[in-house]
Amino acid sequence: QQKNLGKKLRASPVWFGLLAVASMFVQMYVPIVDKNFQSIAFTLPLVAGVAAACYYQAGKIVSLCLTRSGLPVGKVYAADMIGASMGCLAAIGLMKLIDAPSAVLLVGGVIIATGLMFDRAVKGRALALGLAAAITIVGLGNAAMKDRPIYPRWTKTINLDRSISNYEEWNPISRITVSPPLASLPVYVAGRSPMLPKDTKTDYKMLRVDGAAHTAILKFDGKSFDKMKFLEYDLTNLVHFIPNLKSVGIVGVGGGRDLLAALYFGAKTVTAVDINN
């Protein structure tokens, strides 16, 4: 057994929790991808370094428990695997309730507090509890706010300022944002035909998945397709020119544009499926 094992096992969760929170903030507020190589040469090692330091502390905890605790290795490793499995399931449940940054803060607070389970010495106990409580309170406060102050600001080269969205929702696989209504803009078509009249305008909202992947939610009154003629000038709708096509299946609903296209071209039934609820 190693001397001062409990003290070291208490310190690692504290560092693990703090570095997990620090890594999250770096990833949210530092633009990792940039056209400027000098910028990437600085930001990429920064993000990777903080994340690596976080995982180092996590690995240190497991390694010390396996090699220095004096307990049966099989049982210690089984406990590690059971805990990891339960953590994965808990993460899914947590992400169904709150946003990812708030979840990371809550988990960071819990991680710091778990260090006290390894060593309950009075010295350092108050500091660990204080850090755990502070981080947890910040996470709960952020989750409770409508316009959360802690949110991903950068995705690749896109600055996701609050001004470009008025709706945000998280789930276990993504972050969804929707822009305010955008009026009289050039039509949103993926495979633009050169025959499309250049002055064609439409109204839509921009739906983004994790910031970078985006699609349009077209303005539609549910009745008239008169303003949807531009759909005929999009190569991605070529399938609808198949004669007597009455039933359409769509994988990936997005903003509903493909649904409108299918109905515009005369489909009688449309079945759409999506992995993102």
Image (cartoon, rainbow, N blue to C red):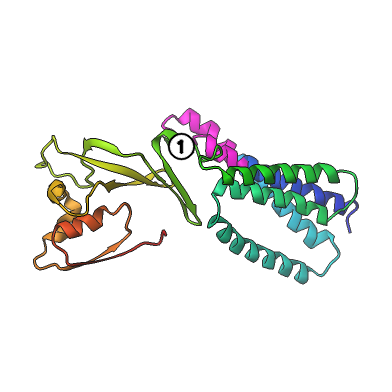
Q: Name the residue under label 1.
A: 33
Extent of the magenta region:
23-47
How many numbered marks, from 0 up? 1
The percent position of residue 76, horizontal first and vertical second, equals: 77, 67
Assign the C terminus to one quadrant of the image: bottom left
Taking the image as drawn, is residue 53 in sight?
no
The percent position of residue 67, horizontal first and vertical second, equals: 80, 61
Residue drawn at 55 percent across, 42 percent down: 145
The percent position of residue 32, horizontal first and vertical second, equals: 50, 37
The percent position of residue 101, horizontal first and vertical second, equals: 57, 45
Residue 75 sits in which quadrant?
bottom right
Residue drawn at 70 percent across, 47 percent down: 17
Q: As displayed, is residue 129 above or below residue 75?
A: above
Of 255 and 81, nearer the camera is 255
Within the magenta stretch, is there residue 229?
no
Which type of secondary structure does the marked residue at label 1 adopt?
loop
Within the magenta stretch, is there residue 32?
yes
Of 69 and 191, nearer the camera is 191
Residue 64 sits in which quadrant?
bottom right
